[in-house]
Image: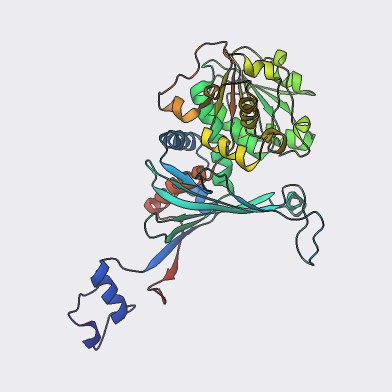
């Protein structure tokens, strides 16, 4: 019910609950009630809203990359293309209580605005520590905050581990949808962790022709968990082949996804596949680290695709040449080769431009395509926005009040 409009709020002897003369004056002047509520969505709420719908998430990410190609977005940094801002720690802290550097030991804020059909601002915020696994916790614990693009007011606070996991699988899923052979049968998985389990589910939903999954992992427990998950979520798969080597996993695979944990120590530590192992017509997706000889990348018949060329240009500035030595994302090998004059920049193509029909996707059944995925907070904000709108329609989540009227304004 709308509040009463009073000629002289100060003269009123009684006002409806929650209203003050100051608040009523603000409503009269702006037409906007200053009350701010936030929708809190825990992980159970996110599942009810469909965070694990791999087809819907892939469709959402396809709209995201189209919007990126059109330029209707902003992320952090001077160029608006920074992946985010990390708080990292020294190897030997001089202050008591300060965390010590270690694998995946960081805090990170990833702000973004995404336009197009989304028109939403937000930030993904998380802390990460590989030792969390010993405590029964995920390595990274993530939250997403969505903000009104005009007022800046928060509108949603969401559990985001599943947002991040499913959008991480859906971005290479866009590549499978647009670039993989229609008759792809064999999927190769390097790094059978939780994210790659969801990725396999996504790929199999997009290519029901897949009937075999080859797996290269470091430990049998992770491989067994992966197979158990896929048996429950990928009914079209009949054969599971555990591989001892990367060569065995790569050969005869129509689609591959590299999703190993971030290695350290230079590119010689990255998973390496030889050109001769790659099947003609294969789509090679690199969400995690990957390395390969330059000869296949320099072959003009090979297609090189990334999720956002502007972000790779920014990484080349943030991690000065040789970028690939410091930053494991495969597309940084492309920017290093461009820097060296070995490759023209036009060889590095945007998946968004392909989705927008500006450039062709696959041009032949035997074309080999490499697709580098770096991940961006615009993806989390977009999928979070879709789920927020579904939650409102379904009555999911808990409303939290920030204020009825701000004390200071």
In the rendered view, would you say 278 is above or below 189? above
Residue 293 x/y as whole percent: 71, 20
User: As rendered, which of 360 and 213 lies closer to the eye?
Assistant: 360
| Image quarter hosting the C terminus | bottom left
In the rendered view, would you say 334 is above or below 32? above
Residue sitting at the far left: 7
Residue 229 x/y as whole percent: 65, 35
How many numbered dots are placed on residues in this image?
A: 0
Left/right of residue 325 with respect to residue 257 in the rendered view: right
Q: Which residue is painted at 53% across and 30% down in the image?
A: 173
| Image quarter hosting the N terminus | bottom left
| Residue 332 position by quadrant | top right
Residue 335 appears in the picture as rendered = yes
Q: Which residue is painted at 69% across and 49% down in the image?
A: 139
Describe the colour scheme in one phrase: rainbow
In the rendered view, would you say 362 is above or below 98? above
Left/right of residue 177 with respect to residue 253 in the rendered view: left
Q: Which residue is painted at 38% across and 41% down in the image?
A: 116
Residue 206 appears in the picture as rendered = no
């Amino acid at each position: 019910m709308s509040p009463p409009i009073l000629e002289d709020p100060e003269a009123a002897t009684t006002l409806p609950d929650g209203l003050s003369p100051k608040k009523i004056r603000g409503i009269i002047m702006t037409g906007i009630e200053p009350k701010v509520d936030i929708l809190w969505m825990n992980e159970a709420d996110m599942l009810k809203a469909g965070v694990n719908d791999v087809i819907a998430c892939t469709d959402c990410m396809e709209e995201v990359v189209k919007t990126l190609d059109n330029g209707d977005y902003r992320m952090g940094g001077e160029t608006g293309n920074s992946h985010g801002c990390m708080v990292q720690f020294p190897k030997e802290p001089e202050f008591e209580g300060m965390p010590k550097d270690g694998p995946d030991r960081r805090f990170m804020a990833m702000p973004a605005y995404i336009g197009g059909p989304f028109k939403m601002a937000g930030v993904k915020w998380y802390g990460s520590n590989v030792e969390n696994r010993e405590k029964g916790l995920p390595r990274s614990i993530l939250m997403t905050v969505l903000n009104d693009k005009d007022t800046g007011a928060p509108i949603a606070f969401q559990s985001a581990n599943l947002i991040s996991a499913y959008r991480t699988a859906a971005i290479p899923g866009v590549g499978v949808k647009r670039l993989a052979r229609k008759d792809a049968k064999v999927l190769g998985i390097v790094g059978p962790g939780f994210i790659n389990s969801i990725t396999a589910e996504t790929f199999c939903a997009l290519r029901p022709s897949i009937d075999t999954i080859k797996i290269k992992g470091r430990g049998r427990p992770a491989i067994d968990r992966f197979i158990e998950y896929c048996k429950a979520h990928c009914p079209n798969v009949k054969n599971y082949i555990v591989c001892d080597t990367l060569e065995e996993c790569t050969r005869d695979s129509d689609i591959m996804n590299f999703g190993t944990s971030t290695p350290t120590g230079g590119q010689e530590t990255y998973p390496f596949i030889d050109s001769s192992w790659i099947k003609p017509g294969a789509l090679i997706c690199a969400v995690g680290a990957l390395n390969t000889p330059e000869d296949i990348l320099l072959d003009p018949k090979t297609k090189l695709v990334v999720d956002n060329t502007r972000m790779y240009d920014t990484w080349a500035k943030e991690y000065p040449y040789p970028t690939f030595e410091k930053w494991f994302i495969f597309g940084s090998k492309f920017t290093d080769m461009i820097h060296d004059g070995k490759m023209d920049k036009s060889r590095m193509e945007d998946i968004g431009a392909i989705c927008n029909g500006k450039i062709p996707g696959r041009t032949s059944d035997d074309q080999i395509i490499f697709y580098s995925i770096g991940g961006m907070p615009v993806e989390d904000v977009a999928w979070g926005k879709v789920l927020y709108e579904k939650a409102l329609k379904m009555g999911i989540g808990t409303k939290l009040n920030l204020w009825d009227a701000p004390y200071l304004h």
